[in-house]
Amino acid sequence: MNLAILSCGPNSYSTRRLKEAALQRGHKVKVLNTLKFAIDLQQGIPDLYYHQNVLRDYDAVLPRIGASITYYGTAVVRQFQEMGIFCGNTAHGITNSRDKLRSLQILSRHNIGIPRTTFVRDKKDVIPAIERVGGAPVVIKLIEGTQGIGVLLAETMKSAEAIIELLQSQKQNILIQKFVAESKGKDIRAFVVGDRVVAAMRRVAQGQEFRSNVHRGGIAEAVELSDEYRETAVRAAQILGLEVAGVDMLEGKDGPQIMEVNSSPGLEGIEAATGLDIAGAVIDYVAAQVDFPEIDIRQRLTVSKGYGVSEIYIPEGADFIGKTIKEVMHEEKDINVLTLYRHGKAIPNPRTHRELEAGDKLLCFGKLESLRDMIPTKTQDLRRPEIQDLHSEELNTTHEDDVDK
């Protein structure tokens, strides 16, 4: 495999480890400065130039895009995608994860734990917003902060008002978030590669610091995650469209609460805490994708006009409840059920004799007209966007610590 690592910091720990792991496995690898590319566009020929030389010989790209260069960095990644080169994370996934508000908006429509969060601009809305998330203390976050920077704990309503007023006067966009008291000073970082968690650590803040980031002096220790935490981490990464991600979770009394999903997770802290070769796991995954690429069917399976992939949600009271998949998807509908989602678990290629239950979600391929006809009435009344064709941006979606600035 001929691999390019996009990085403005070739000497950062993560970039060095990824290059080292690739070389150990016999791959060719170069670290390319993200800001040194030129993007050329003409009909039918998307091109990239690096130091004035056309670039076409790479099989895969691993982006390490810093927050300060998100726009240009994602433009470069997008161009690699248009050239048909596999990217460890897509531009769309990076964009989704980089904005805390955007990522939580996307996650909020799925059955996945997130802290109660609100976003306001009008001064009159601040106090009602704080009350809606449970009152003080609250966590106040800059939407694009990283490494714990721009994350503040307001112990009282007055201090929360003062902090928000100050930040808004500086034209900063901020989130107001419920303070998960039982998780104060600690969180979980799960490192997701593809469809599995390859390593996890618990980060514990020191002294009076409530932020547990290693960059803020937090201590990291390896941790074995339960199935619930592993599945939540993988689902969050996939919902935002990321193949390689660091998923930060709070340990709430009701289960995992997603804080944020990082598209360029640092390797140093988690490799030190776990002793695992995480860089190697990333390289092995990328190499496997180059050799045998998976296709995101929700983006690519437009094999014939009028066909596509859609999700169908089965609410309480729907006519489908108690019927088998075979009874619901009889042959004349020309629909195949690819995956059944039940109680947070994915069941691929479900057997047709399975009976459907309230709360089930079906990922189906078939005639879009037939799929639309199958939306239960209650689902339509609730305006749930559960059935979408291949052009849906959110179905195609899928921060960073030690990344290049």
Image: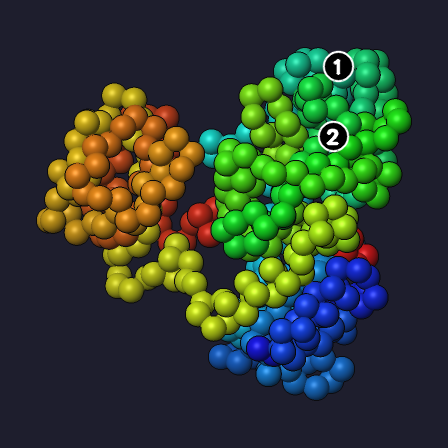
Q: Is residue 363 above or below residue 115?
A: below
Q: In which quarter of the image is the N terminus?
A: bottom right
- Which residue bears the numbered disc 2? 186
Q: Is residue 38 left or right of residue 104?
A: right
Q: Where is residue 384 in the image (x, y as percent from the top left)?
A: 39, 32
Q: Is residue 265 above or below residue 231?
A: below
**Which of the 4 quarters of the picture holds residue 225?**
top right
- Residue, x 69% and y 19% (percent of image)? 182
Q: What residue type is labelled 1?
A: Ala
The residue positioned farthest toward the bottom in the image shown: 53
Q: Which of 75 and 285 is in front in this view?
A: 285
Return the residue nearer the eye: 86 or 200.
Answer: 200
Q: Residue 136 carries which label?
A: 1
Q: In which quarter of the image is residue 5?
A: bottom right
State the residue in front, 125 or 96: 96
Q: Residues within 10 Å of mark 2 (few under 14, many from 20)?
A: many
Q: Which of marks 2 and 1 is in front?
A: 2
Residue 185 visible here: yes
| Residue farthest to the right, as pictured | 207
Find residue 226 and report its horizontal and vertical position in percent.
54, 34
Q: Which residue is drawn at 82% across and 16% down?
A: 155
Tell me which amino acid carries mark 2: Lys
Asked if 281 appears above or below 246 in the picture, the reply is below
Q: Residue at x 61, y 38 (%)?
A: 224
Circle 1 SS class: loop
